[in-house]
Image (tube, grey):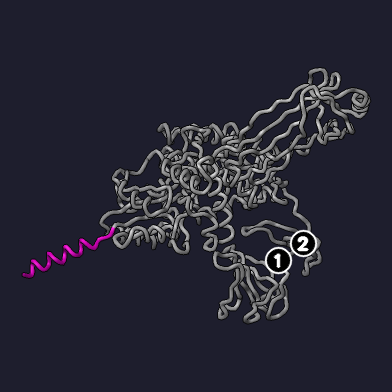
Amino acid sequence: MTVKSDNVSKKKKTARKKTLVIVESPSKAKTIGKYLGSSYKVMASVGHVRDLPKSKLGINIDNDFEPEYIAIRGKGDLIKELRKEAKQAQKVYLATDPDREGEAISWHLAYLLGIDPMSECRIVFNEITKDTIKNAVKNPRPIDLRLVDAQQARRILDRLVGYQISPLLWRKIRRGLSAGRVQSAALKIICDRENLIKGFIPKEYWNITASFVKGFDARLIEYKGEKFSADCAQKVENVLSQLKNGTYVISQIIRKERSRKPFAPFTTSSLQQDAANKLGFTTKKTMMVAQQLYEGIEIKGHGTLGLVTYIRTDSVRISQEARRAASEYINVNFGSAYIADNVFSNKKKDIQDAHEAIRPSDISLDPEMIKESLTKEQYSLYKLIWTRFLASQMAPAIFDSMQVNIINGDFAFRANGSKLIFEGYQKIYSPNLDEDRDRLLPSLKEGEKLEVKDVTSEQKFTEPPSRFTEASLVKDLEEKNIGRPSTYAPIIATLLERKYITRQKKVLAPTDLGFLVTGMMEEHFKEIVDTGFTADMEDKLDEVEVRDLNWKQVVRDFYSTLKDELEAADKAIEKVHLEDQITDQICELCGKPMVIKSGRFGEFMACSGYPECRNTKPIVQKTGVSCPECGGDIVAKRGRSGKLFYGCSNYPSCKKAFWYKPVDRKCPQCGALLLERNSKNAKYVCSNDKCGYKEQ
C-alpha cells in the first residue's frame, strides 16, 4: 500500500510541472501569462543576459575573433532563478523578440540553461494576441543560428570599432568621446550637410505669371520651345514688355483622371519619420511608445492586449488574415468601393521579411474606442499606425485634372487645375500634399482668346539644403543603407549625448566637437565614415543571415584594414586642445571666470584658474518653482548614478527634493506642489505622498 501511495504522489507531482516560457520584458511576460493560463510560467530575461564585458574589448583577436561572453553584471540572481525554474519545468520555450537580437538572446539563454539550441525550444510571434501566442506554442522550432551569427557579426564589428577608436579619441581630444561603425558615418552625413549650407552661393531666378480676367493664373514655362529661365531684372523687363503687347490664346486643354495610391503600411523607419513629422515625436520617444503598444496595455472591457505587431521590421508585407480583416472592416464602415487589393514590395527583397509591417493586431479596435485606456502619446501613435494600415488597404484617391496650355507668340504658359472626385484612402489618411489640393479652373475651351489682367514677375533666389530633422536623417540613412532602422533612435541619442550635434528647434546641427571628430575620422579612418563602404558592410552582414556567409570572414576582412589604420593614427594624431566655453559667472573662491567642462555625467562649471583653484559646481537649470520649505529655487540636478531629480538650490541647508519635475501649481486638496507625472493614469500628481491627488 505504501508503494502505491508513493507512485500516486509522484504522478501528481509530475502532473503539476509547468511549461516555462521566457520572454524579454516583464510587461510582455505579464500579458502572455494571462493568455497561456496556469499550466505555464512566463518569466522575463529583462533583455540580454550574456554579453561582451564592458571593462575590456572582450574579443580574442588571436583566436579568430572568438567573443568572450560573460553573464551581465547584476543579472546573477535572475539567471539563478531562471535555471531553477528551467530545471523544474516540463518544457522550456524561448520566446524573445522575432529578430536577430531576439534570436541571439534566446541562444545565450539556451547556453546558460543547458538547452540544446537545435532542439525545438524557440517560439516566435509577430503580435501579442491570445490566438497568436497559443499557435506559437504549438509550433516551436530550433534556434536559427544564421540569425545569431548575423547579430554576432554586427556586435563584434561595433565592439572592434568602438573599443579601439574611442580610447584614441580620449587620448587625443578628451575623455567621454566615442566612435562607432554606424554612428561615425551618420555624424559625417550631418557635417557634410552643414558644409554644403555654409558653402552655398545663392543664384538669382525669376518667375513670371499672367493673371487673367476669368479668374486664374498661368506660369510662363517656355520660350521658343525651350524651358524659360531668367537670372537678371533686365531680361525680365524685356520679356514683360513683349508679353503685355501680345495676345493670349488657349492652345491645348488636357483632361484626365489622376489617381494617387495609398502609402505602404509602416516599417520601423517610416513610422519614425511620420511620427516626427505629424506628432513631433523624437525617434527615441516613438520607439518607446511603440514598444508599449506592442507589449500590451490594459484595455477597458478587453483585458490586456498587444495593440500592434512587432515594431522592428524592414518589411511592408501584410498577412492574408490581416488583409481579409481590413477588407471586411472597410466594407462595413465605408462600402465596397473603398476596398482595394494593394500589393506593396520591399526595396530590398531578402532582408528581415520574416515578420510583417507594423499594423494593428486587431483592426476592429478603433482608436476612438480605446482612447480612454491610453495615454495621450499611446493614443496618438496607435491612431497613426491604425489609420496608415487601414488606408494601405483602401482604394486610390481619384482626381479630375485639367492642364491648360496658353501661348503668346513664342511664349508658352501653363495652368493646372484639379478636383478630388473620389476620396478613396484619403477619407481617413490625408498626406497633405499640395498637388492633391483642389485647384479649380473656370470653364475654358481650346482656341479661346484670354483677356489678361496683369503680368507680374517675382525675384527669387535658390536656397541651400536644409539641416536634417530626425525624420529626414532617418530617411537619408535608410536610403543610403546606413545601419538598420532599429538602431536609428540610439544613434541619434548618442550623437546628442556626446555633444557631437545639437537639436535646435527640431533640426540637428553639428557642433565644433562633431566637426573635429569627423575630420579626424575622415583623415585616419576613411572607410568607417564612408557611406558607400558602410552600406556595403551592411549588405555583407545581411548576407550572413540570408546567404549563410561566414561571419568571421566578414570580421577578418574588416579588421585587417582597421588594425593598420589604428597603428598609423596613434602615431600621426597630435593631442588636440579644446577651448573651454567661458561663462559670465565668477568663481567665488578666486574671482576668475568659470568655464563649462564635460564630465562623466554631463557638463559642469569649473574655475578657469585650475589647477591652482579647483572650485566646481553644477550647471543649474531652474524650474521657475520656489521651494515650499525655504523659498529657494527648485533646480534640476543629477545624482551620483546620473539620474535626474529636482532639489532645492539651498542644499545642504535645505534637503527638499523630488523625483518628478514640480510645476508652479498647488494641489487643490492639500496645498502641496504638483509634479509632472505624464503617466497613463495622470498628467500631474500631488507631491504629498499621503494626499494621493492626481489629474489628467
User: Which residue is nearer to you in this view: 544 or 566?
Assistant: 544
Circle nearer the N terminus (2, 1): 2
User: Which residue is nearer to you in this view: 169 or 113?
Assistant: 113
Is residue 438 covered in magenta? no
The answer to whether 244 appears left or right of 630 in the picture is right
Name which residue lies at 29% across and 57% down.
19
Q: Quadrant of residue 218?
A: top right
Three-letter code, disc 1 = Lys
- Vertically, is 271 above or below 75? above
- Mark 2 vs 1: CB contact within 8 A: yes
Residue 594's tag is 2
Three-letter code, disc 2 = Met
Is residue 8 covered in magenta? yes
Q: Main secondary structure of the magenta part?
A: helix
Name which residue lies at 64% across and 49% down.
278
- Vertically, is 106 above or below 634? above
User: Which residue is nearer to you in this view: 524 or 145?
Assistant: 145
- Vertically, is 651 above or below 554? below
Does residue 152 appear in the picture of this structure? no
User: Which residue is nearer to you in this view: 362 or 130?
Assistant: 362
Name which residue lies at 70% across and 47% down.
507
Query: Which residue has dot 1 on it?
Result: 617
Q: Quadrant of residue 198?
A: top right
Q: Could you classify mark 2 by the number of other residues whose Cα lies within 10 Å: few (under 14), some (14-19), or many (20 or more)?
A: many
Measured from the top left, where is residue 300 in percent x and y? 47, 64
The answer to whether 234 appears left or right of 147 in the picture is right
Residue range in magenta is 1-18
